[in-house]
Amino acid sequence: MSLFPTNYQAILERIDSFDPIAYAKSRNYANGAVSRLSPYISRGVISTRVVYERLLSKGFKLYQMEKFVQELAWRDFWQKQWQYHGRAINQDLKHNQQNVNQHGLPRAIHEANTGIEAIDKAIKELYSTGYMHNHLRMYVASIACNVAQYHWQIPGKWMFAHLLDGDWASNALSWQWVAGTNSNKKYWANQDNINHFCHTDQWKTFLDFSYDDLPHQEVPRILTESVLEPTSKDQTNMAHLSPTGLPNWDVDYKAICLYTPYNLDPLWRNDLKAHRILLFDPEYFTQYPISNKVFKFIQDLAIENIPELQIFVGSFDALKKHFAHKEFYAKEHPALSYPVDVLDSRDWLSPDTPYKPSFFPYWKSCAKALKLELNTPKPH
């Protein structure tokens, strides 16, 4: 079975087979009991709310799965950060990154040749599967930004390009958290920490120092050579992808449901008689390139689960101009926002929890709302 199946029923079965109690105990380990639901949440096939409610229906109590629900809240938090800050998340958000001596990506990271066994294995798995454990993402970012002293932007885009769950806010702001531009200090990981959580037994590496000493080491020679365009050889070049012909149909509906790579929900507006179009906007993917593997994953998710879907590569303006007499529906997302006629709200974990500038006040508000909801009798 594929590590990331694209069939909707298989995705629901993945939720049903997930154990949030085991997750809480082992989530930080490279072989921990993680859900592997992030690609489907990022692509809008399922929502954080759907996952939460389905786990409740399996009999789990909120206190039993609090660690996992907190991770669901992190995903919503990053989206709200994106909504609030907009394009500002593309730059150093709160502080300028300190001790930047390079731009680009260390070639050793790009080629999975750092010499740190757990890191090189994780990068190879990223290329082959489109997935990397969250703890390993932090390790890679720490090596690139703090040990090698590269600015976070190009390494962040490199990782984003290969992630099936690529969410620019979650990715960029997490890289900034590691680099100290979206937090009050840098995140460091030494060899002892990596050995512990990755079950390796490696020593005498460039990370084999105490946390007091590691920040004062010279940049390891193996990390000094850079790659300036790390995704150019394997990304989908949306800038030169030929626009497809405008969709046409045998029947004529008044409405068009507009899907994007971040809204592939097969249940969205499925009671509405509408034409259904998946829009690939070359302008967006020129700014945020994705790998061919990610592009195919998005296509497969959409085609397999959304009946009578047509794919259009081009601009929203071209669609709107050609179908000016039709009513366009879309679902809100900060990455791709178009002037449609009807914009549906996201399916948030806690719909009434407002934006907060930092996570734990957001989580406190979210948790309070979820507990209140569970304790409020439902109308008969």
Image (spheres, grey):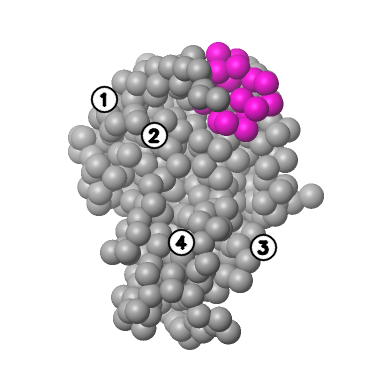
Foreground residue, 344 or 236?
344
Between disc 1 and disc 2, the foreground one is 2
User: Marks 1 and 2: CB-CB under 8 Å?
Assistant: no
Q: Which amino acid, by three-letter code, is at mark 2?
A: Pro
Foreground residue, 378 or 288?
378
Dot 1 falls on a residue whose secondary structure is loop
Q: Which amino acid, by three-letter code, is at mark 3?
A: Glu
User: Marks 3 and 1: CB-CB under 8 Å?
Assistant: no
Q: Which mark is residue 41?
A: none
Quarter where residue 11 is shown? top right
The residue identified by callout 4 is 260
User: Marks 4 and 1: CB-CB under 8 Å?
Assistant: no
Q: In the image, what residue occupies the spot 23% across and 44% down?
A: 85
CA distance separating discs 1 and 2? 29 Å
Could you say where residue 296 lies in the image, as x and y percent from the top left? 60, 64
Above or below, 217 relative to 108 = above
Above or below, 231 relative to 360 = below
The residue identified by callout 1 is 184
Q: Which residues are drawn in magenta?
A: 52-69
CA distance separating discs 3 and 1? 44 Å
Between disc 3 and disc 1, the foreground one is 3
Q: In the image, what residue occupies the spot 37% across and 38% down?
A: 78
Foreground residue, 330 or 312?
330
The residue identified by callout 3 is 304
Q: In the image, what residue occupies the spot 26% across and 25% down?
A: 184
Specify few, some or many for label 3: CA neighbours under 10 Å numbering under 14, 14-19, or 20 or more. some
The residue identified by callout 2 is 351
Between disc 2 and disc 4, the foreground one is 2
Quarter where residue 120 is shown? top right
Could you say where residue 53 lies in the image, as x and y percent from the top left? 57, 31
CA distance separating discs 4 and 3? 15 Å
